[in-house]
């Protein structure tokens, strides 16, 4: 077999793998839509569970998930972007041993299983700091999970800004901070926003961290403060699938909740795409 034949065979294998992967995802999505579309309605999303969660809707789980994502965004985005700016713009030229350790730790933490963050949140926020099983403990735990993703992706977005932009701004008399704020950061903003929202999308589907830090199986109302427990879509799906006394009876609700969670994550990714497109057009 000559080199041309080997190359053709290799690309055929890659193409086959791509087709299998895409077909599997499409089939899975089609199955979820088929099973959950009958439950998807306005009343299903805006009503409370009834009859031991065997009937009714998922309103408290949707609200709890949105509360959780809002807190994670407020906690993780400023810290993650600030750390990325420091690592990219201020620690790059004279990188110390501490900075190298931070870079390695950030890259490694991005791949740590979520259950580890759940145990960390249980020990640190719930027990040691005394926040208890609450929305605050869960959001802080998910913020730790999201931070490495935001930092790593934001650093890469900042690196895509041409170095000539920095040199031009400095040559015109701008300070380092002015260059970073008015030249570098605006050009890196589309990538930063995209990476941050994708990181939040991942956090929206996590079950183990919130299960150990603040989510409840059932609540008759909505959380009134950050120190209250809450309901969330990922754990609601898990609970209906594994802890319901009659899983067959709750199966339509399970698929409906999965479809709502999927639509929520896809909506967050759509927002990321729209923001990236908007800022790229604005900069161009």
Image: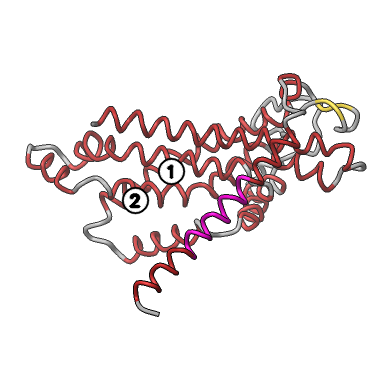
The answer to if 147 sits in the magenta stretch is no
Q: Nearer the viewer, residue 3 or 205?
A: 3
Mark 2 surroundings: few (<14), some (14-19) or many (≥20) residues within 10 A:
some
Whichever of callouts 1 and 2 sits on the residue coming sooner in the sequence is 2
The quarter in which the C terminus is drawn is top left
Residue shown at the point (38%, 42%) measured from the top left? 81
Q: Nearer the viewer, residue 173 or 127?
A: 173
Which quarter of the picture shows residue 245? top right
Q: Which segment did they paint magenta?
A: 13-26
Residue 36 point in image, percent of width and height: 74, 34
The alpha-carbon separation of the residues under discs 1 and 2 comes to 10 Å
- Mark 1 highlights which residue? 195
| Above/below status of 142 relative to 12 | above
Work out which residue is located at the far bottom of the displayed protein and give it: 1
Which quarter of the picture shows residue 223? top right
The answer to if 24 sits in the magenta stretch is yes
Label 1: state its secondary structure.
helix
Residue 250 point in image, percent of width and height: 85, 37
Residue 237 point in image, percent of width and height: 75, 41
Mark 1 surroundings: few (<14), some (14-19) or many (≥20) residues within 10 A:
many
Q: Nearer the viewer, residue 160 or 34?
A: 34
- Mark 2 highlights which residue? 156
Label 2: state its secondary structure.
helix
Q: Nearer the viewer, residue 269 or 111?
A: 269
Residue shown at the point (92%, 41%) measured from the top left? 246
| Above/below status of 244 relative to 13 | above
| Above/below status of 82 relative to 47 | below
């Amino acid at each position: 077999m000559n080199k041309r034949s080997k190359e053709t065979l290799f690309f055929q294998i890659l193409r086959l793998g791509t087709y299998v992967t895409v077909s599997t995802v499409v089939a899975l999505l089609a199955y979820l839509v088929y099973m959950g579309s009958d439950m998807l309605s306005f009343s299903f999303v805006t009503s409370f569970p009834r009859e031991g969660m065997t009937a009714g809707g998922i309103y408290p789980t949707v609200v709890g998930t949105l509360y959780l994502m809002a807190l994670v965004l407020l906690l993780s985005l400023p810290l993650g972007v600030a750390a990325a700016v420091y690592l990219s713009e201020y620690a790059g030229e004279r990188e110390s041993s501490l900075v190298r350790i931070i870079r390695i730790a950030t890259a490694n933490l991005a791949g740590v299983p979520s259950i580890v963050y759940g145990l960390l949140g249980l020990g640190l926020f719930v027990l040691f700091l005394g926040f208890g099983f609450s929305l605050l403990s869960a959001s802080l735990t998910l913020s730790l999970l999201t931070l490495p993703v935001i930092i790593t992706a934001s650093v890469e977005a900042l690196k895509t800004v041409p170095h000539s932009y920095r040199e031009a701004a400095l040559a015109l008399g701008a300070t380092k901070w002015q260059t970073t704020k008015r030249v570098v950061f605006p050009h890196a903003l589309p990538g930063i926003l995209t990476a941050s929202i994708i990181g939040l999308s991942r956090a929206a589907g996590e079950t183990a961290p919130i299960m150990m830090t603040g989510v409840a199986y059932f609540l008759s109302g909505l959380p009134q403060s950050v120190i209250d427990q809450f309901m969330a879509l990922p754990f609601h799906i898990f609970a209906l699938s594994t802890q319901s006394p009659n899983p067959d009876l709750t199966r339509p609700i399970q698929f409906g909740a999965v479809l709502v969670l999927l639509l929520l994550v896809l909506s967050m990714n759509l927002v990321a795409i729209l923001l990236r497109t908007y800022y790229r057009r604005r900069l161009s």
